[in-house]
Amino acid sequence: MNSRPAQAAPAPWSGLRIVLVHDWLTGSRGGEKVLESVCRLFPAADVLTLLHDRRSVSSLIESRRIRTSLVQRLPRATRWYRHYLPLFPIAIELFDLDDVDLVISTSHCAAKAVVPTGRARHLCYCHSPMRYAWDQFDTYFGPDRLGRWPSALARRVMAGMARWDRDTAHRVDRFVANSAHVAGRIARYYNRRAAVLHPPVDTAFFSPGDAAPASYFLVVSALVPYKRLEVAVDAATRLGVPLKLVGAGPDAARLRARAGATVEFLGAVEGPALRDLYRQARALLLPGEEDFGIAPVEAMACGRPVIALGRGGATETVVPGLTGAFVDEPSADAFATAMAACRADDYDPATIRAHAARFGTARFEASFSEAVADLVAEGPGC
């Protein structure tokens, strides 16, 4: 009798030469969490990226062979990379993929536009079509931010970027969107269908604590314009209630200048310290329209409610009255009203936690593997 244990069948992509393409490695929380999961699924794959800040990403990603673009060699690239945006199309298209059979990109900007060979298959996990080139130009480059004439010049540049973003969508064989909201934007701007697979959240690590919540509200976000964090800052300042902001980014100075005495900027916080902040928060605030939003699910996994703008990805993760509340407009007055009405005993932490569990990492990795396997089963490209 043969007592040897049965061996698992090889993965459908076994033997294929695979690369992972990511826009830039500068510590983006949601994008990095997706890339970590993809790295676990494809442990031998190289990572191609426009830019790599070695101080900013996890050890799992750092353990990979990382190949960077010409952007890496530009002056102060890890700090000024956003100023080099017009060079991104050239930089991403110069990557040599001649020996690659399978391309997996995780993209919100340029990664999806790499140029694979005709035989290679390309799956793109899309966080969003290029926001600043399509529907969020004014938030980043409007006259109130750059001035009249610089904004007019930027509009011409971004119009060209939008055309390039649209015209390179055919380089992807299959799109997977991080939310139904983003799938709609892919259909609108690329005229392509996309399956929906919500990003992974470490719901095993993010879990409720034993202590009663404190009085502060919490924001966990990159400090960038489209997040609309000034809404949360202004609301907390008007109410005179404590607000803690976790994150870093180019909007930090502007937000500090308008913040009152009850607003505290904590910078980058990760690991157990971040989990403790979630556990003790009265509620997490999400004042901007998110493509998906990792932080709300992390907060809910810790049993804490979310007060969110009722648009975008939040409508797919937050259940009003059960796991949080929606605000109808992105104004300080509207958020202040919702914050004043939020009481800890209005929500059951166990119910909130149970809802968040459906966004776990294992669920994402199993579904992502299936999507890749389906694409590989179609055979080489033309």
Image (tube, helix red, strand yellow):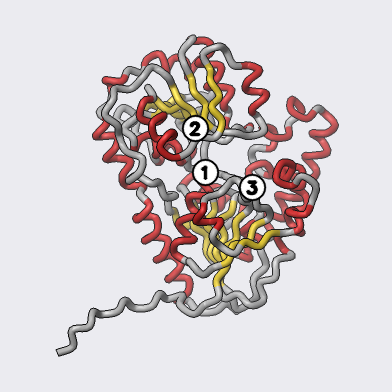
Q: Nearer the viewer, residue 207 or 291?
A: 207
Rounded to the nearest angstrom, the CA distance separating label 3 from label 1 is 18 Å
Depicted 61 relative to depicted 147: above or below: below
Question: CB of mark 2 within 8 Å of CB of mark 1?
Answer: yes
The structure residue drawn at horizontal position 41% and vertical position 29%, both measured from the top left corner, is 277
Whichever of callouts 2 and 1 sits on the residue coming sooner in the sequence is 1
Name the quadrant of the N terminus. Answer: bottom left
To which quarter of the image does residue 265 belong? top right
Q: Which residue position is annotated with label 1?
A: 29
Above/below status of 300 relative to 343: below
Rendering coords of residue 168 (x, y %) = 67, 61
| Tag 1: amino acid | Arg
Query: Callout 2: helix, strand or loop?
Result: strand
- Residue 220: give its label: 2
Disc 3 residue crowd, few under 14, some 14–19, many 20+, Cα 10 Å: many
Whether 143 is drawn above or below 380: the answer is above
Position of residue 191 in the picture relative to residue 298 (left or right): right
Report the amino acid beneath label 2.
Val
360 or 192, which lies in front?
Answer: 360
| Other-residue count near label 2 (Cα within 10 Å), few / some / many at <14 / 14–19 / ≥20 | many
- How many marks can you see? 3
Residue 124: percent from the left, percent from the top? 55, 60
Disc 2 and disc 1: Cα gap in Å?
10 Å
Image coords of residue 147 (percent x, y)? 80, 27
